[in-house]
Image (cartoon, rainbow, N blue to C red):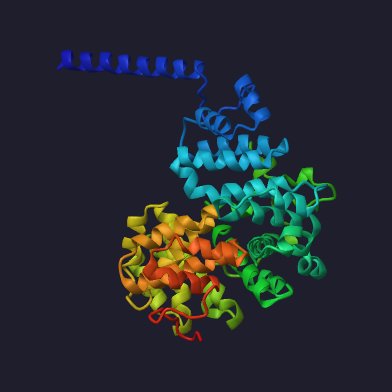
Amino acid sequence: MRSLRSIFVRGLGVAILLLAVSAIALRLSGYQIASAPPGPLPASLHDALISGDSLAVASYVRHRCFFGGWAQKRGCYEGILMELVDSGRVRLAMTSLELLGNMDRSVLRQGHEFTHMVGIAALKPETPLGPAFESCTGLYQSGCYHGVVQAYLMNHGVDSTQVAGLCDQVPLARTNIWLRFQCDHGVGHGLEMVYQLNLPRALAGCDLLPTPWDRESCYGGAFMENIVGARESGAHIHLVIAAKKQPGADPAMRPAEDEHAEHMQMVMPAATASTYKLRNPADPLYPCSILEDRYRSQCYGMQAGLMAESLGSDFAKIAKACDGAPPNMRAQCYQGIGTYVSGFTVRDHGKAIELCSLGSLKYQPWCFVGVAKNLVDVTSNPDDGIAFCHRVGLHLNKVLCFYGMGQEIALLKPLMTDREQACTRVVEDYRLACRFGTGNSLIPPPDLPRAEGSE
């Protein structure tokens, strides 16, 4: 027994020695523990920055932040992204982040929050809204655009005239409906952030926007911020440029005292602290169930994210809860399930189809629409959603999926000729559904599923 113990101890000592030697070798080759303070940037990274080589930057970030748990890696990724943004290289930060997502699957799951962070940091106090907004891309559900608008509202306040005319300050958002949506959606995020998750107050701010379409787009941003920002692990409410860097900032806005505080947290003024009840565990449909009718469509479209907090990733139970929504809101609730499924499965089309199929046959077509639309929202490329729809099985599910793709194409492509060309990528039997969604055809497919209460 003593001999075995001796062998074990010697073996353990050898293993520890090997680990130590490996760590030293990796350290000498350039790897660092994710939480370790970054050292001087190597010449190769300087060269990458000068040339705008996003692949070299992404490889460097992955190489540098290799070790540690997700929290450590995330902090390391954030620190380098902030260096890029602070040096005025917003586009390089975005393209590098996209490539980093291909290297680290965890980045895909958190990509929207990373892009929010980049957008918030991109809006300096002296930078006009338009140029900062237009420095973004649509990567990861366009979070950069939303972050810019959030930061603008934090810097300039939420005066009613300011809110109503904000998106008119972005030249491209005056003519491009997709960018207009991103701006309006960002206003919803920003109002919810300024009012410290006081949802009714944020929604009332959205009501100041000029058209019903603008207001609906804003509501969606407020509901998204309400869900993500209120999570203990959520980052939206914590993604911040330090208040100490903002001239004239409210003295009540104090950055948190941790190593990432300068970029990563903004404490809201105490005067706006919310007394609004964020969650009701006894009611899986709260807050949608208590809101005025004009807010309900967008609310139910986001509700799956809230239900998952109490029901876990049991999508059969989430679908069952949606079956208890008002009849005219069930399709919207199912589409929200699809949006959540898309993020949960991280581009695994087979798994997404499996999870959407757990819902009732009557409403599951909208779940597939939610998945497909979210795929397009992440990449701004309709081909990603079209590829998913081609894999969907049941005919009615497929028809509605391609109709939803037509709607997405219409947002991304203002020219009818470009919309027509995009629909040619759809298999011929379902091309009419796509064309009806884009508006290129006024004749609906005869078997297009209809939501209750729709015309």
**Seen in the image, is 91 located left or right of residue 282?**
right
Asked whether residue 51 appears in the rendered view, the answer is yes
Task: Name the quadrant containing residue 417.
Answer: bottom right
46 to 313, vertically: above or below? above
Q: Please indicate whether residue 368 sits to the left or right of residue 110 in the image.
A: left
Find residue 242 and report its horizontal and vertical position in percent.
72, 44
Furthest-right residue in this view: 248
In the depicted structure, whether residue 96 falls above or below residue 349: above
The residue at the point 47 percent across, 40 percent down is 102
- In depth, the one of 44 and 424 nearer the eye is 424
Residue drawn at 49 percent across, 60 percent down: 374
Q: Is residue 133 left or right of residue 397?
A: right
Q: Position of residue 222 (x, y in %)?
A: 62, 66
- Residue at (67, 34) in percent of width and height: 83
Residue 436 lies, in percent from the top left, at 50, 74
Residue 305, image x, y percentages: 47, 63
Front residue of 188 and 92: 92
Quadrant in which residue 215 is drawn: bottom right
